[in-house]
Amino acid sequence: MFNNWLKIAFINYKKNWLSTIINLFGLTIGLTGFMLILMHWNDEESFERWNPKKDNIFYFQTYHKPENSYGNNISVPMAKRAKEVIPGVEDYVLFNGSGIGLKMTTKVKTVFQKDGMTATESFFKFFPFKLVAGSYKDALKGESVIALSVDAAKNLFGRTNVAGATVKFDNKNYIVTAVYELPKENSQIKPEFIITPPAEQFKNDETSWGNFNYAGFFMFKPGTDPEFVQKKFVKDVFEYRASLDKGESGMTIQQYLDLYGPTNSLLTPLDEIKLYAKASWFGTGDFKTMMILFTLSVLIVILSAINFINLKTAQASQRAKEIGVRKAIGSTKSSLVLQFLLETFLICMASYLLSLALTELLLPSFNKFYDKEMVMNDWHIYFYSFAMVLMVTLISGLIPATYLSNFKAIETLKGNFARSKHGVWLRNGILTLQLIISSFFIIGGLIVNQQVKYMMNKDLGYSGKQIMMINFNESDPKPWLKYERLKTEMRKIQGVVDVSYGEAVPGSGRSSSSNMDFMDKSIQGQHGSMDYNYLKFINVKLKKGRWLDPNLSSDTINNVLINEAFVRKFGWKDEDVLKNEIKPGFDNKKYKIVGVVKDFNIRNLKTEVEPIIFFHYRETEWKRYNVYNIQLKIDPNDIDGTVKRLKTYWQNNVEQGYPFDYYFLDRQFAKTFVKYQKQQTLFTILNAMVLMVALLGLFALSSLMIEQKLKDVAIRKTLGASDRTLIVGLTKQFLWITLIAVLISIPISYYLMNEWLKDFAYRIDMPILPFILSLVTLLLLTFSVVSIKAYQATKVDLVKYLKYE
């Protein structure tokens, strides 16, 4: 029996070779896309799974309800108090620096070592890397200690057994306490060396509740409920801090929290940070985009299943007599269903094997696209993709199998099936669903393209062209003096037009902020310490008031500029702005506003421009120590030559042994678009795949349905119908289905794309053109695809179809 089923299956594959190829091709494409996206998701989920303590380690984040904003930092006193008073909190570890590069000297050589991290002494309790040399006990206790990775040890000493050896940097000697091997598995925390925060700085931070300069992980005792800890954090840490700080203000605890925040805490499990964290030092996850991509890949597989169902039901008339004969000689309904399921499963398995080969072929390009190193060695990929094959087999096999097996033997043997209306509604309904999905992809693709184009063409409020930023080695004890010396010397280099410094640099990703108080209101504002000419240097426009002036002593004491977002946040009227004085959280004195500048974006165009306060870097003593760059405007006629001269000068006269760390502002900010450009590219590829699968299915379906009407065509042509009339008659049904499908898809697409656009602070208004183009495109494509077969139908041999009438 099984052999007979196989013979029948292959006879039908050969007989309907076009639909067989289309089913194979469509499902192979769909499963390949599904597997690639599944591998991407699985890779994102795999971060930190190597850690045996992951179930008890949680990353700390904050939430401020009035501003609906998430933070990823914590202060030292908050972490200490949480350990002391919250049951279930066993320990904590804090970071206040990552990606650090330092010039280190050993007895062997001097090298620039990258990718270091500063962490408190509990680090190895949380991240138990494999120990190669030394001991983790007290490895980070004290100030002059350092732990090295295997690669860093080899880089510095040429060997790994270097526990007890000395490394010199920042004019101090550090003892190597441990050498560790970094995990080969995915991890965001892979420091090449670890040092502790400077003792003097950490001592001051231990009493500063408002100094949110650290990222924090907490280790819980087994069985501790994270929800319980979050509530206790608000009650016993945030409210406690508020009771200490609010003083004689007369505010309630809740009023203080609403004003200064945070109002709530969030704890994300260690192995979920990469994808699910609301805010993170190590890169914020984007689970929403992952779900969109995964859903789109599943939709392509569903489209392939729809092709199966449509083509199988359209072929029903060809198999009606076969089924009638088999039923007449005793075949049961269940055996017929199993046979048709087998035929579907064979196609699905062939597609599965082809998709495995195609996925392996495309994986290097996919890895390059996402900057990953994925390989097909995870059983989850094979398990879930095979489960998808079984699901497609059931969905696309069971419906037509049940439909075909329900034919009445007597009717099919009499030849009455051809006049039956069975299956018409099923085919039309499924074809409508297919075109709804296709319409959504066209609309969505056009809207994504318009949004990305809008972001890339938007006026950023500044000009970063020909502006080169060089980062300082931050171990310099007096960086502001270094900047002032270099400003004078580097002006003399041929090709340098102007020089300046700014803290709030577009695209740099660096920022610092504090509360800004005015009367009984407070907001969070970014710090923009700078040189006098910086805003004019990057072509920011002055809206009101004046620029800071180096000839006015007050401009280095307590005068500031603010941006439009600052004004909006306080709700000030334009005419009152220059009368106001504010008290920033970084100082005890009040600052007078002397000017307002137009908004310019320093992060990316997904987020709103934040309130920023601009002041000279000498106004606050501690800001001088944070000067971290020098920016140069380059002559556009000799950029390459000027860069070479600057590099030579820098490496010979400024920071010998350190890399020349520079970039151009406009190119750096352009990197913030990469994520959305990749989304645009993927959506375009998926869009093309969807249309290809849908149109091939439509062509095969229309071919089968038109073939069933060839006798009608022959009769009408004999009676004098023109080719044009016949083509319109044959395509009219498909055009109506397309029109209905697009009309149904419009509200669905509008809602889903509007939800996607809500994530962008700077977004397009929902355009009408994509909806119109979707309708026109699908109608034209449907007509083009169907009319090809319809035209061929008008050339039928009349004698062949009329000789028995």
Image (cartoon, helix red, strand yellow):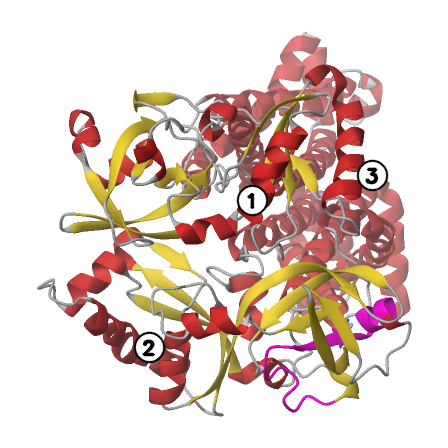
Q: CA distance from mark 1 to mark 2?
A: 42 Å
- Residue 366 lies in the magenta-colored region: no
- Whether residue 493 appears in this view of the structure is yes
In the image, which residues are magenta? 135-156
Q: Which residue is mark 2?
A: 233
| Residue shown at 76% from the left, 84% from the top | 130
* Residue 700 % position (x, y): 74, 36
Can you identify the residue that label 1 sits on? 481
Image spot of residue 720 (x, y percent): 68, 7
Name the residue at 35% across, 62% down.
Answer: 63
The residue carrying mark 3 is: 18
Relative to 666, 247 lies left or right = left
Which tag, 1 or 3, sits closer to the chain's start? 3
- Quarter residue 177 falls in: bottom right
> What is the three-letter code of the residue carrying label 2?
Phe
Q: Is residue 499 above or below residue 636?
A: below
